[in-house]
Image (cartoon, grey):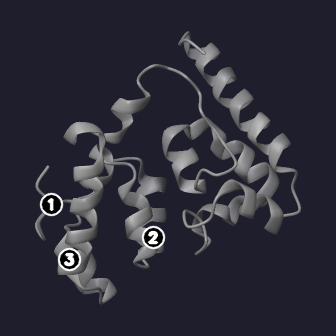
Amino acid sequence: MNVTKDSKVSEIISAYPGAVTVFKRNGFFALMARLQKLSAKDDTTLGAACAHQGADVGKLIQDLRAICQSASGGQPQAAAFDTGEIVITKKMKTSEVTDRYPAAKAVFTKHFGAGCFTCPAFGTEDLAFACMMHNTNVDQFVKECIEAVKKERGAKGAPC
């Protein structure tokens, strides 16, 4: 995907879930929260989002292109996880876990509260730090996330 100022933000994120971290690093928390809630295509372009946010569109495009190019051989990042293996570690970023495994969102809400996903720190911190900040045992948290994913996959008949 060639990222330009006319690229739709929802399409970038759909193709490269790791791009969420880039957007959040650049202060696009409200836009990311809105896209998560809609779970649908949004026609906001990168240029419009940057104009609204007051962000440097050139710098953001550069950061996003780096994510796109580093994705497994130019393919969407999700392709690296098509094996079905559930990999959640305490060093993973919070958004990385919820992007890959939406079932884990229930565990985040249980331990961190419903406002977790709109918190400015969400996506910038790893699970170990998030758990420390919320006085939660990280090993138990990771275990619960994995169990939630297994349960969801079992309900859908997918391999665990």
Question: Circle 2 sits on which residue?
Answer: 24
Separation of residues labelled 3 and 2 (CA atoms): 16 Å
Q: CA distance from mark 1 to mark 2?
A: 17 Å
Q: Residue at x 71, y 59 (%)?
A: 114
Helix, strand, or loop for circle 3?
helix
Q: Residue type at mark 3?
A: Ala
Say which quarter of the image contains residue 27. Answer: bottom left
- Identify which residue, 86 or 32, lies in the foreground: 86
Q: Nearer the viewer, residue 100 or 8?
A: 100
Question: In what element is the residue under mark 2?
Answer: helix
Q: Which residue carries the number 3 mark?
A: 48
Give percent across and percent down for residue 126: 64, 59
Q: Earlier in the sequence, mark 3 or mark 2?
A: 2
Counting from the top left corner in percent of width and height, residue 13 is at: 32, 52
Q: Quadrant of residue 3?
A: bottom left
Sooner in the amino-acid sequence: mark 1 or mark 2: 1
Are circles 1 and 2 on residues that touch, CB within 8 Å?
no
Left or right: residue 107 compared with residue 76: right
From the viewer's perspective, is residue 5 above or below residue 97?
A: below
Q: Residue at x 54, y 54 (%)?
A: 95
For mark 1, what is the residue?
3
Amino acid type at image mark 2: Lys
Please tell me the numbered disc located at residue 92.
none
Lateral position of residue 146 relative to residue 74, left or right: right
Residue type at mark 1?
Val
Residue at coordinates 59% horizontally, 19% vertically from top-left?
A: 153
